Amino acid sequence: MEAKAVAKYIGLSPRKTRIPVDIVRGMDVTNALNVLKYMQKGAALQVMKVVESAFANATNNYKMNSSSLYISEIKVDNGPTQRRIYFKGKGGYRFLKKPTAHITVIVSDLISEDRSDVKSKLKVRTSLIKKGKNISSEDKNKKVVKVEETLTKDGKSE
C-alpha cells in the first residue's frame, strides 16, 4: 500500500532541492527524517515537511504500520519560473529568474507487499552510507593489478 504527499510551487531551485532528495531516496522514513533534520542544506527543511506529510498520510489515512514504512519514490520536478525585471544603467534592464520546484514523495509499507528485493537494496544502501563512497587504496591496487594482468595475457605489454 502507498501514501503520497506533494508540495508544489516551492521557492527553491530544483537542482538544489535534488541534493537532499538523492540522499534520502530508499531510506526508512524515521531514518530519513533524522538525516534531513540535521542536514545543512536549505532545501532539507522543505523535503522534511513533505516526508512528514506522507508519513502522516500513511499512518492516519491508510492505517499503515509506522515502523515498516520506507520512501519508495521521491522526485523533484521543475515548476514555473517567475521572472522579475531589475533595471540597469543607461536605461537597460535584466531579467531575474526565480525558479520553483514540485516535490513528490510516495511512502510504501514493506510488510504489506512482498518486497525482498527492496529490503536487500535498503541493506546495501545503508552499508554504502556507513562506509562512504571513497575507494580505499587496497581497492585501487586491485584494479591496477587486474589491468596489468590483462595486459600480460594479451602479450602486448612484454
Image (spheres, rainbow, N blue to C red):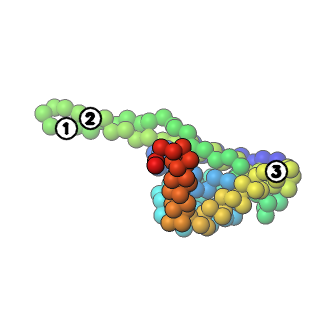
State which tag comes first along the sequence, 1 or 2.
1
Q: At 61% from the left edge and 67% from the top edge, which residue is drawn? A: 130
Please say if the residues under marks 1 and 3 sit with CB atoms less than 8 Å apart.
no
Q: CA distance from mark 1 to mark 3?
A: 58 Å
Q: Which residue is denoted by mark 3 in the rendering?
A: 115
Dot 3 crowding, Cα within 10 Å, few <14, some 14–19, many 20+: few
State which tag comes first along the sequence, 1 or 3.
1
Q: At 54% from the left edge and 66% from the top edge, which residue is drawn? A: 138
Q: Position of residue 104 (x, y in %)?
A: 63, 44
Q: Position of residue 131 (x, y in %)?
A: 59, 66
Observer able to see residue 62: no
Nearest the viewer among 151 and 140 is 151
**Amino acid type, label 2:** Arg
Q: CA distance from mark 3 to mark 2?
A: 52 Å
| Disc 3 element | loop
| Disc 1 element | loop
Q: Mark 3 vs mark 2: give the one in front.
A: 3
Observer able to see residue 110: yes
Please say if the residues under marks 1 and 2 sit with CB atoms less than 8 Å apart.
yes
**Amino acid type, label 1:** Lys
Q: Which residue is denoted by mark 2 in the rendering?
A: 94
Q: At 22% from the left edge and 37% from the top edge, which residue is drawn? A: 87
State which tag comes first along the sequence, 3 or 2.
2
Q: Position of residue 49 (x, y in %)?
A: 61, 56
**Amino acid type, label 3:** Arg
Q: CA distance from mark 1 to mark 2?
A: 7 Å
Q: Which residue is denoted by mark 1 in the rendering?
A: 88
Single out the residue that lies furthest toward the left.
90
Q: Mark 1 vs mark 3: give the one in front.
A: 3
